[in-house]
């Protein structure tokens, strides 16, 4: 073990941490918006819309994320109408291709988590809200959605952890985030074991922080359980 090399490589790898955090935050934020829309479509009652939303979820949950990244980065440019569109200045950049692929992937998984959480809200609470004079939309916004978010947090925490690790795949399309920098240094030093240990430790710390944030969110959103304890 070359401990000196591991210590010297840490600042350089931390230089890619900013890009890694951008990928994590950007994909999770956009993925949450996609998941909310898809979950509502899955619960809309319209068979055509439900089928289209279910097909999207099936495809992105059933195929590897690496394949999805390659299809977005290498595949979309094959279509002339995309190259001629206003989206091409973004889709020709590996950064936005990685964001798009990660967003679509996490959106599919999160939509199922959210849909299950919405369906698990006790019907009695919804009926009580309607008896108080709330409209269906108001009951959804003030009763169903807050309860569903509280119930989905443990499962969503797992998705956050998976997305933190999934950002390492962005290095396959030339992005120099933590793993990309580690791979470049390995090509120069051939110290595979030491450098990947340092990269893994950085992801481990990121996931530790993510789990603490999810736990804090659960604690904040369940005051009734704190009072009972």
Image (cartoon, helix red, strand yellow):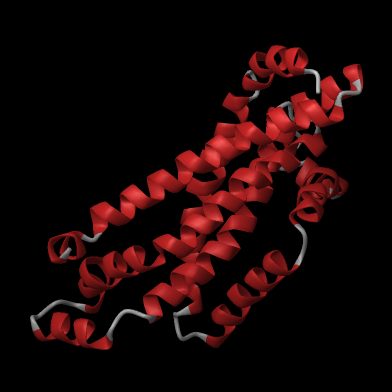
Whether residue 26 is situated above or below residue 113 in the rendered picture: above
Residue 145, placed above or below residue 12: below
Identified at 74% across, 30% down, the residue is 175
* Residue 72 image point, x, y percent: 77, 49
Q: Position of residue 25 (x, y in %)?
A: 51, 40
Q: Residue furthest front?
A: 1
> Toward the viewer: 152 or 142?
152
Going 48% across and 64% down the picture, which residue do you hit?
A: 155
Q: Position of residue 102 (x, y in %)?
A: 64, 49
- Examine the rendering and report whether any part of residue 188 can be seen: yes
Give whichever of 47, 101 is nearer the camera.
101
What residue appears at the point 66 percent right and 18 percent down from the top-left corner?
A: 10
Q: Quadrant of the N terminus?
A: top right
Q: Is residue 101 above or below residue 60?
A: above
Residue 103 is situated, as x and y percent measured from the top left of the image, at: 60, 51
Q: Quadrant of the C terminus?
A: bottom left
Vertical position of residue 4 compared to residue 165: above or below: above
Q: Quadrant of residue 65?
A: bottom right
Is 24 left or right of 77, judged from the image as shown? Answer: left
Task: Identify the residue at image location x=55%, y=80%.
Answer: 50
Count of number-bearing discs: 0
User: In this orientation, which residue lies closer to the viewer: 42 or 27?
Assistant: 27
């Amino acid at each position: 073990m070359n401990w000196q090399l591991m210590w010297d490589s840490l600042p350089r790898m931390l230089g890619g941490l900013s890009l890694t955090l951008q990928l994590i935050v950007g994909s999770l934020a956009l993925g949450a918006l996609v998941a909310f829309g898809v979950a509502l479509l899955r619960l809309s009652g319209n068979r055509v819309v439900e089928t289209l939303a279910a097909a999207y979820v099936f495809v992105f949950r059933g195929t590897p994320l690496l394949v999805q990244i390659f299809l977005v980065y290498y595949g979309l440019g094959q279509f002339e109408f995309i190259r001629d569109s206003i989206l091409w200045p973004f889709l020709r950049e590996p950064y936005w291709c990685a964001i798009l692929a990660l967003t679509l992937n996490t959106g599919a998984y999160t939509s199922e988590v959210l849909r299950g959480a919405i369906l698990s809200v006790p019907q009695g609470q919804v009926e009580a809200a309607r008896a108080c004079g709330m409209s269906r939309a108001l009951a959804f916004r003030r009763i169903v959605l807050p309860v569903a978010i509280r119930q989905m947090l443990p499962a969503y925490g797992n998705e956050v952890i998976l997305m933190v690790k999934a950002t390492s795949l962005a290095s396959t399309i030339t992005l120099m985030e933590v793993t990309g920098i580690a791979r470049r240094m390995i090509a120069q030093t051939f110290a595979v074991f030491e450098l990947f240990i340092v990269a893994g430790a950085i992801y481990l710390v990121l996931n530790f922080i993510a789990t603490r944030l999810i736990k804090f969110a659960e604690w904040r959103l369940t005051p009734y359980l704190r009072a009972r304890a």
